Image (spheres, grey):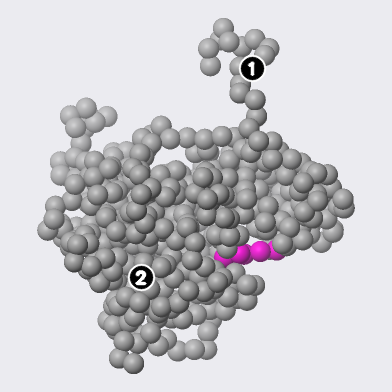
Amino acid sequence: MNSVHDMGGCEGFGPINPEPENSEPLFHHSWEGRVYALVRMLGLLRRWNIDMSRYARERITPAQYLSNSYYENWLAGLETQLVESGLTTKNELITGMSEEVAPADLRALVLQPDKVETTQLMRMSYYRKTAATAKFKVGDKVRAINQHPKFHTREPRYIRGHSGIIHEHYGAQVFPDLSAQGIEEGHHLYSVRFESAEIWGASGPSNTAIYVDLWEDYLEDTRS
Amino acid sequence: MNEQHSHDHEHTEPPSSTELRVKSIESLLVEKGLVNSETIDKIIDTYETKVGPNIGKAIIARAWTDPQFKSDLLDKPDIAISAFAEIGGQGEQIRVLENTDQVHNLVVCTLCSCYPWPILGLPPVWYKSAPYRSRAVADPRGVLEQFGTTIPTNVEIRVWDSTSEMRYLVLPQRPEGTENWTEEQLIKLVSRNSMIGVEIVNPPTMGTVNE
């Protein structure tokens, strides 16, 4: 969906003001760590996937998204997901009081403290098998399709309609546009190189190229 | 931390509405049996003490001192990185980007905050912020200047927008003057920011050589 999370090329957000690397705390408030841990932990219940989490944050209204801190957006996304997945009711979130204990099969999946270290460091693989053969190969010229879906997509706006060259074929990986709707399919994924001038025009940054990871669904053959 | 301050009331701000909301949600989820507060403590502790840029720094220092490892890291990152800790089978989803005299690499996620956290830890606030996410792809040299980094105009800048589950680690150039340094000494020289590409690794100053 076209919203403010898709920031590539926007102006006016001001200076970056990075905190010095050696003095930046991991969490700036203790509740941030708790939100982070809650999201990680609840994710293991498999009631949603990473694309659904991103989509929940993308649906935060633009003014709210931009005024929230990062972990405030995580919290708002989590509240959406708790209700949409049925893990809690809207009323439970409002009152903070449980109406019903979660079913035993769900409670059995809750991560226990002694399993944290082994589980935390693992990141799942997003490679999936597909019967489809890859449409493109390294060196092919492709164009990012002009699309404006109402749902989750990982094709950023700033490259839509622009042409680039396939830099690498990463194999088939979970396609986020469907994954955010609960359908898991592996689609071919590529790294595509775009020249700066192709995207930003003649006044854009010189001697610069932008590499974007794009699924085959986002690409068209420029010969057609 | 002042000892004279350890009397029995706290000079803290009243809790923010966000803090209260988080407490309320956590206690609700505990009551429903969906989370465990000890697990939450343990996850926070793991990130505060174990997950961080140290793995990335060790990978870079090894690449600087072991040509075979460097070549594997660039060509077969899955095999090379799996030798460096329990980060599961995700090496195959990492690409290592080598900075050279001709190319400087910079990593961003314009859509959210994708970052190679198992080897660099959680991303800093600036990496997740609108100013960085919006400008890195459109004005990388201007962004680099804000980190005090000037890349000569004859060096190509490659910006990597992490729009998929692939993760990118920049292999910075080994600074001059470190030819006789050991791997352990080099680890201390590598900054997290240099592995994102917003900084270069500076040559050692007199004070750090014999550290």
Q: Is residue B91 above or below residue B9?
A: below
Residue name at image x 34 percent, y 53 percent: A11
Q: Nearer the viewer, residue A197 or B34?
A: A197
Across and down, in percent, residue B65 comes to 25, 51
Across and down, in percent, residue A104 comes to 84, 58
Question: Outermost residue toward the left?
Answer: B154
Q: Is residue A100 above or below residue A166?
A: above
Question: Would residue A216 be found to the left or right of residue A36 on screen?
Answer: left
Residue name at image x 52 percent, y 38 percent: A27
Which numbered disc covers residue A159?
Answer: 2
Q: Do circles 1 and 2 both sit on a common chain?
A: no
Residue name at image x 28 percent, y 49 percent: B143
Q: Which residues are magenta?
A: A47-52
Across and down, in percent, residue A117 comes to 60, 48
**In front of the other: label 1 or label 2?**
2
| Type of the residue with mark 1 | Glu
**What residue does disc 1 label?**
B10
Question: Outermost residue toward the right?
Answer: A100
Q: Nearer the viewer, residue B15 or B4?
A: B15
